[in-house]
Amino acid sequence: MVKVITYGTFDLFHEGHYRLLQRAKQLGDYLIVGVTTEEYDQTRGKLNVIDSLVTRIENVKKTGFADEVIVEEAAGQKFQDIKKYHIDIFTVGSDWIGKFDYLKDYCKVVYLERTKNISSTMLRERNKRIQRIGIIGTGRIAKRFMPEAACVSGISVQGVYNPHIGSAESFAKNHDIDCYETLDDFFSAVDAVYIASPHQTHYEYAKAALEHGKHVLCEKPMTLDRRHAEQLFNMAKERNLILFEGIKTAYCPGFIKLMGIACSGAIGSIKSVEACFTKLEDEDSRELTDLKYGGSMLELGSYCLLPIIKILGADYERLSFDTVKGDNNLDILTKAYFKYPNAVATATCGLGVKSEGQLIISGTKGYILAEAPWWKTNYFEVRHENPDDVEKFSARFLGDGLRYEISDFLSMINGSAKSEFKLTRSESVAFADIMGKFLETEKRNLDENLGA
Ligand code: C2G
C-alpha cells in the first residue's frame, strides 16, 4: 500500500485545494491530510486565516479524498509524521517547489502543479471572499509580492500586466500565473490590482484600475503630485473602492507598536523626529540613472516621511530640501527639513551615500531609538535621562513584510475599517504633496543653474 501525505491550511476551501487533494489521492492508495492550526499558521507568518480549524477539517473531509485527517501544529512535524505513518510520498503544490526537498532523504517528494486560475464561477457559487489580484509591473518588488501574497489567506494572484509583453510572459511563466496583452483583458480577470510599475506610471494605472471598478494597492510613492492623490482618493470613494498606498512599514506590527508607544506620553511631548534610510545602489541601477524619476528622495523618501507625518502631522510651517548630486545630477543624498510650530524633523535618504539608518523620536521625557532596518521594525528602545532606564520592545517581522499590507488591504476590501488608521488618506496626500514640492525645488534649482 502506497501512503501519501499532504498538508495545508485549506482556508476558504476552493478549487485549487480540491484539485490538489484529488491528485494527491491518485498518487497512492491511502491519503493523510495534515491541516494546520491557527497557532502554527501564525508562527509561519500566514495571515488572515478566516475559517476555524474545525471548518477547515470538515471541508477537507467533504471532498472524500482523505483517508485520514491529522492536525499540523508545529514546524518540524512533517519529518516526524513521515516516520510515524510510514509515508511513501510527500506532496504539496508547486508554489512550494524546492522548499521541501529536505524530506527527500525520508520519502519521495512530489510537487503537484498548483491551480493557476481560481475560476470566477467557483467564486460566485461557493466563495465570494477570495479576491483575485493582478500585478502591474514585473520588477524586483513585484517578484517579492508573490511569496508574500502566498502567506495571506483569501487572495489569489491571477496574473500580470506589463506593456513589454516579453517581460510579462517571463514573469508569468516563472510564477505560474497568467499574462495579458491588453489592460482591458487584465482588468476583466481580476478584482484588485497591485501597482508595482515605475513611479511616474502609478497615477495613470491607478486611475484606469479605479475606472474599471478595481481595488488598488499602489506602491509608494503613490503619486508625485497632491492633486493626483486627491483625485484618486475621490474616485475610489465615489466608486466604493479601496485605494491603499503600499508603504510596508506602516502596516508592520513593530512600527504600529512603536507609534503607539510614541504617542502614549512615554517620552513626554514629542519635539523632534529624525529618520534616516540609506541603501547603496549600483551606479547603473534604474534608481541612479532615471534622470526624471530616480534619485534618493523619490526612492526612499516615503519611508522617512512616514514617522514624521504620522507623529507631527502635515501642518508644518516650513519645508526645505538640501541635496548632494551625483555626476548625472540625480540626488545621491537628500535631507528634508521640517519646521513645526513647536517641533522639528529631518528625513535623510541616500542611494549613493551610506550612513547610520536610525529613527530617533525625541520628547521632553525621553526618546525612542529604532536602529536600521527600522523600516522593517522588529526592535526598538525607549530611553531616558538615566542610561539604565531602558525599555526594550520587539515584534515579529516576517519575510519581506509585504504580507502585512496585503492582509490589511484584503480586510479593508472585505469591509473592515480597522486598518485604516495605519496609513490614512490625508497622510498619503501629504506624502504626494511633499514629493511634488521636492520635484519643484529640484526643477527650480536646475533652471537657476542653467540660467546662471
Ligand atoms: N494549492 C493549489 N492551487 C492553488 C492554491 C493552493 O494547488 N491555487 C495547494 C497548495 O500548494 C497546497 C494546498 O493547496 O499544497 C493547500 O494550500 P494552502 O491552504 O494555501 O496551504 P499552504 O500554506 O500551502 O500549506 O504545512 C503547510 C503546508 O506546508 C502548505
Image: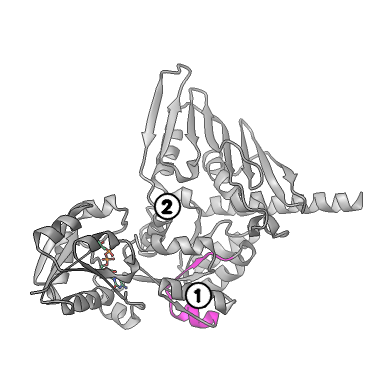
- Which residues lie in the magenta part? 182-197
State the residue lying farthest toward the front: 105
Which residue carries the number 2 mark? 401
Residue 279, compared with residue 367, is above or below; it is below
The residue under the point 46% across, 81% down is 188
Which residue carries the number 1 mark? 170
The residue under the point 47% across, 52% down is 248
| Direction from residue 349 to residue 391 in the image, left or right | left
The residue under the point 55% across, 82% down is 182
The residue under the point 45% across, 62% down is 145
Q: Is mark 1 within 8 Å of ligand 1?
A: no
Q: Secondary structure at mark 2?
A: loop
Q: Is residue 190 magenta?
A: yes
Ligand 1 image position (quadrant): bottom left
Q: Nearer the viewer, residue 136 or 426?
A: 136
Q: Badges 2 and 1: C-beta atoms under 8 Å apart?
A: no
> Residue 125's x, y, as percent?
27, 80
Inter-mark Cα distance, 2 to 1: 25 Å
In which image quadrant can residue 353 be found?
A: top right
Task: Name the amino acid, label 1.
Answer: Ser
